[in-house]
Image (cartoon, rainbow, N blue to C red):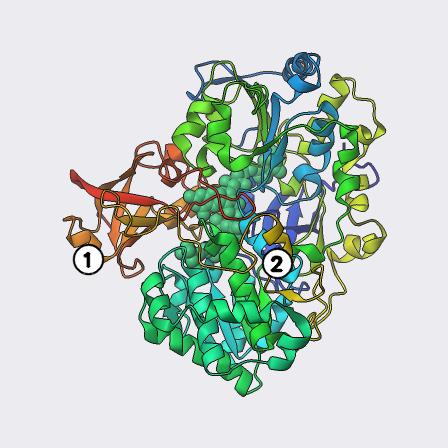
Amino acid sequence: MRDSHFPIQVTGTHEVLGACPHDCPDTCSLVTTVQDGVATKVQGNPAHRHTDGALCTKVSRYTERTYHLERILHPLKRSGPKGAGQFEPVSWDVALTDIAQRLQAIVNRGPEAAQAILPYSFAGTMGLVQGDGMAERFFHQLGASLLNRTICASAGSEGLTQTLGGKVGMRVEFFAESKLIIIWGSNSITSNLHFWRYAQVAKRNGAKLICIDPRKSETADKCHEHIALLPGTDAALALGLMHELVQNDWLDHDYLQRYTLGWDALRARALQWPPERTAQVCGIPSEQVRALARDYGGCLQRKEPAAIRMNYGLQRVHGGGNAVRAIACLPALIGAWRHRAGGVLLSSSSQFPVNTKALERPDLLAGRTPRTINMVTIGDDLLRPASPEFGPAIEAVVVYNSNPVAVAPESAKVAAGFAREDLFTVLLEHFQTDTADYADYILPATTQLEHWDIHLSYGHTDVLLNQPAIAPLGEAKSNTQIFRELAQRMGLSDPCFTDSDLTMCRAAYGDAVDFEVLLKHGYATLPVAEAPFAQGGFPTPSGRCEFFSARLQAQGQDGLPDHVPNHEAVGTSSEFPLAMISPPARNFLNSTFVNVKSLRDMEGEPILEMHASDAQSRAIRSGDVVRVFNRRGEYRCKAVVSSRARAGVVNGMGLWWRKLGLAGTNVNQLTSQKLTDMGQGPTFYDCLVEVEAVAGINVNTK
Ligand SMILES: Nc1nc2c(c(=O)[nH]1)N[C@H]1C(S)=C(S)[C@@H](COP(=O)(O)OP(=O)(O)OC[C@H]3O[C@@H](n4cnc5c(=O)[nH]c(N)nc54)[C@H](O)[C@@H]3O)O[C@H]1N2
Ligand SMILES: Nc1nc2c(c(=O)[nH]1)N[C@H]1C(S)=C(S)[C@@H](COP(=O)(O)OP(=O)(O)OC[C@H]3O[C@@H](n4cnc5c(=O)[nH]c(N)nc54)[C@H](O)[C@@H]3O)O[C@H]1N2
Ligand SMILES: [Mo]
């Protein structure tokens, strides 16, 4: 439903302010140039401090994605077997009427049966309106299963919340003033470019940069030190660092006493982690642990600010929650929070006063408490029969803003689940993704250039508004509009199902943000303290930084952070001796953009980085096609013998579309559905494999 008092301008040249919708901490402010109704250019807004006029390569190609020849612009209905990707065009009326009838038939069987409907969505757009705004209203009203949206950040979010009280921390701009920056579990140049720009300023002003990552990433290349620990050993390293801070008395005793909880217990725990033990668990020299402590403790002695930029890369392992918790404790030990350029940042999203209840209307459940499905275990759950514990088998899935067949773990099961003949799958999409191949209906969705939305950020503290720059292409409709029309066809009469997108944008923050400022500038800065915890005041129950968490203990967990070994730790299997991590590719955004040719050309092809010793012992050379395998399946890609990989760890880069890879699978054919210690998150980087050359095939032509 387009808001008539904001007509799209279709003649002349003008600029429209928007927001990057992608799942990235930077949430850039966009300026789209529109000529006679056609978007010709998308640029970074120079007036927005964090964007600073610069975009990543991907989003600067946004028009290429929007006007892509393969964009789905008409509703499609399956005409071949599931998974074959054969479709025929249908009218919106036919598609929506059929979908509404199919869902209604399930709902008519009563509240228990209604749970056989499952929404499946994640962060294709991070917009609060086109994300889960109208969609959740719809599914709440139907009484569908709830979805636990855990696939990215839930372990780390829980670890951070149990320690600091929420997704809170340093303001990103003050990293520019830090004297020591530890980049922990993040390839910032790839995935957090605008933070990296602040880190560069600090570096030019004499700051030391340390990168902690099993992979020698592009970011590690540009730091002064790189600690290449084994995946899933970050809590051990943090405890080893604490050990050295205690031993050398590099501690801010005043800060510890006033503003923390459980120091004596944490101190005793840390003393169990001398550098030799730490080094052995982490697979690094003990001197690196000591040097890290000298750098961190030195900031206390020199009264200089020390900052840690964690990212979610370190929490995709069994002990991800504990790892984030252990690292989040560190700034309090040396009183780093006293400086505005000191402390830690993982996510800033709890700072945003989003009115989720108004947007998503959980009250429409009206006393019903449907079961919750964890999106990480979609593979198992789609294949689960009805049972008293599980409830009804899943009969209908409505997927939007996500590509589960490519991004969810153990994809053989995910694909088998979506291939079920008796499953009814509806997908709202821009492209014929791997998931689209299994859909019964594909509904063409608008892109960010074609709809209204409003955003938070998990890397800075500005609210952004996205105004539509162009009219929807073809017959595309926004997610909200599709759910509004389905609601209407199903006779859902609550007035919330007629709210326009602009009404929802205004409701997202209510009076907490001046909407006129958003309309004029595209962004509004939240009033967040410069040094939020200089004098304690953590949003935890105790108001302190909680080294010890009574809430965790009450859940039967360890009340203190500890090293929790990987489910599939290096050295525990002779059959599958290599640990595989699968971090993001620079020119893709999860599985988005893989079909944009200019970006795919930059990535080349799916690769597995291997250390020379691991390659030699398997007679593998760069360019060989390899089979990467474990009990869950196999994946073929090109081996690259590279110093980016440490011994014992292979790096399967990027979330390729299965059908654009070498043999119809991607890295997730190998990953498991096992969960993290906290938050029921995925363990993508906790995965043992073996690798062998596929005889006679070498694709090293470049
Ligand atoms: N270009 C690009 N940008 C992105 C994304 C993308 O796909 N492409 N994805 C976006 C998403 S969804 C998110 S959640 C964010 C954040 O996404 P993150 O996943 O944090 O992304 P990266 O910063 O690339 O970093 C992950 C880094 O963690 C490292 N790592 C793997 N295992 C471990 C470990 O056990 N310990 C430590 N210390 N490091 C480990 C990897 O080698 C990698 O360099 O980025 C977003 N930005
Ligand atoms: N092995 C491995 N697996 C991983 C990861 C990893 O590092 N390694 N990373 C994990 C992480 S951190 C995340 S966040 C998940 C990401 O998982 P997803 O959120 O599923 O991410 P994408 O692959 O980007 O798929 C998003 C889809 O939404 C579509 N889309 C975008 N905007 C809109 C819109 O406005 N409307 C509609 N209807 N559709 C839209 C896009 O076209 C795209 O196909 O993947 C996870 N999977
Ligand atoms: Mo993510």
Q: Is residue 435 in view?
A: no
Report whether 205 appears left or right of 215: right
Tags 1 and 2 touching, CB below 8 Å: no
Give the residue furthest to the bottom. 302
Q: Quadrant of residue 447?
A: top right
Q: Secondary structure at mark 1?
A: helix
* Residue 162, horizontal then vertical, whole percent: 62, 56
If you read the primary sequence from the N terminus, does the residue marked by circle 1 or circle 2 appear first? 2
Q: Is residue 685 above or below residue 74?
A: below
Disc 2 target residue: 549
Tell me which amino acid carries mark 2. Ser
Q: Is residue 442 above or below residue 622?
A: above
Other residues around mark 2 within 10 Å, as few (<14) / some (14–19) / many (≥20): many
Report whether 498 appears left or right of 304: right
Disc 1 target residue: 613
Q: Is residue 192 above or below residue 254?
A: above
Report whether 700 appears left or right of 470: left
Report whether 667 appears left or right of 250: left
* Residue 662, horizontal then vertical, whole percent: 30, 36
* Residue 379, horizontal then vertical, whole percent: 46, 30
